Image (cartoon, rainbow, N blue to C red):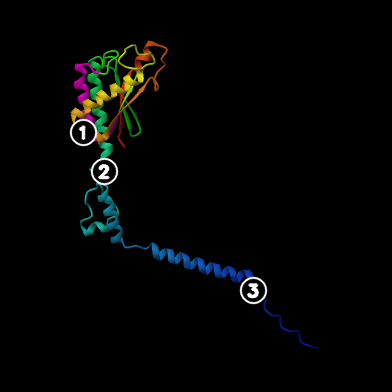
């Protein structure tokens, strides 16, 4: 009787060989990532030191023993100088607003992000149909200039009117009057020493109302000058 041949081992499926190669490559890849991710603690603190000092933080990484500490107190007394100047300017404008209200002049401080608008009603700032401010108002305008100059931001002086046609023969339209009013304040800023490159004047006439022009109260709100400060 013939002997049965021993059964040969089953061949490994082809996909398993490819799978084993893939696992080996993945293992090699993760080992490489781990080796690249291992950095010197000293070099790491040197990088942190440079970033901290560039942002205005105090020099706190001078002692070698700090390298072994996990929590190091960091102070930033000089960080975000523009934010500090913006807060100081807002406070100064609010103080001027109170002084103007005591003098019977309506003013508002409006802030949207980094843009600050100091809104000044013109009924008691300019005589009707005139571009020249009242003499008693000039000190307030100069005080606004000094606060803005100290903050060091750019400012656009905008003139606005209501929609009632102007009757003065000196000006062709409300648009011209609003532009000349803004320009007269810009001239006072120049006398105050405000950098010319950081200021501009614009006139919008009745074309940018903030209230309906169909009531006396609404028209009074639209007669205004706005100091638009870019505090970014």
The part of the image, by quadrant, that contains residue 174 is: top left
Q: Callout 1: few (<14), some (14-19), or many (20+) C-alpha neighbours within 10 Å?
A: few
Residue placed under numbered mark 2 in the picture: 79
Residue placed under numbered mark 1 in the picture: 150
Q: Real-space Cα distance between discs 1 and 2? A: 18 Å
Front one among 80 and 24: 80
- Residue pushed farthest right? 1
Magenta stretch, overall SS: helix
Front one among 146 and 81: 146
Q: Is residue 174 above or below residue 201?
A: above
Considering only order in the chain, which callout, 2 or 1, is on the residue closer to the N terminus? 2
Percent position (x, y) of residue 156? 30, 30
**Magenta-tinted stretch:** 132-156
Front one among 218 and 205: 205
Q: Are marks 1 and 3 in contact (CB under 8 Å)?
A: no
At mark 3, the secondary structure is loop
Q: Callout 3: few (<14), some (14-19), or many (20+) C-alpha neighbours within 10 Å?
A: few
Considering only order in the chain, which callout, 2 or 3, is on the residue closer to the N terminus? 3
- Left or right of 25? Residue 163 is left
| Residue 12 marker | 3
């Amino acid at each position: 009787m013939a002997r049965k041949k021993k059964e040969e081992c089953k061949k490994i499926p082809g996909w398993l060989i490819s799978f084993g190669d893939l696992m080996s490559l993945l293992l090699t890849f993760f080992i490489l990532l781990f080796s690249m991710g291992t950095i010197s603690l000293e070099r790491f603190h040197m990088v942190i030191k440079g970033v901290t000092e560039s942002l205005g933080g105090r020099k706190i990484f001078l002692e070698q023993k700090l390298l072994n500490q996990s929590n190091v107190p960091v102070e930033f007394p000089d960080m975000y100088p523009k934010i500090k100047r913006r807060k100081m300017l807002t406070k100064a404008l609010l103080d001027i607003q109170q002084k103007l209200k005591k003098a019977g002049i309506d003013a508002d401080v409006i802030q949207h992000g980094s843009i600050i608008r100091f809104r000044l009603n013109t009924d008691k700032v300019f005589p009707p149909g005139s571009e020249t401010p009242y003499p008693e108002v000039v000190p307030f305008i100069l005080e606004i200039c000094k606060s803005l100059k100290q903050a060091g931001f750019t400012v656009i002086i905008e003139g606005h009117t209501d929609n009632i046609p102007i009757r003065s023969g000196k000006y062709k339209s409300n648009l011209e009057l609003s532009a000349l009013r803004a320009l007269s304040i810009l001239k006072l800023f120049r006398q105050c020493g405000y950098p010319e490159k950081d200021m501009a004047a614009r006139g919008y006439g009745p074309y940018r109302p903030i209230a309906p022009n169909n009531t006396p109260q609404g028209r009074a709100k639209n007669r205004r000058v706005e100091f638009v400060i870019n505090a970014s």
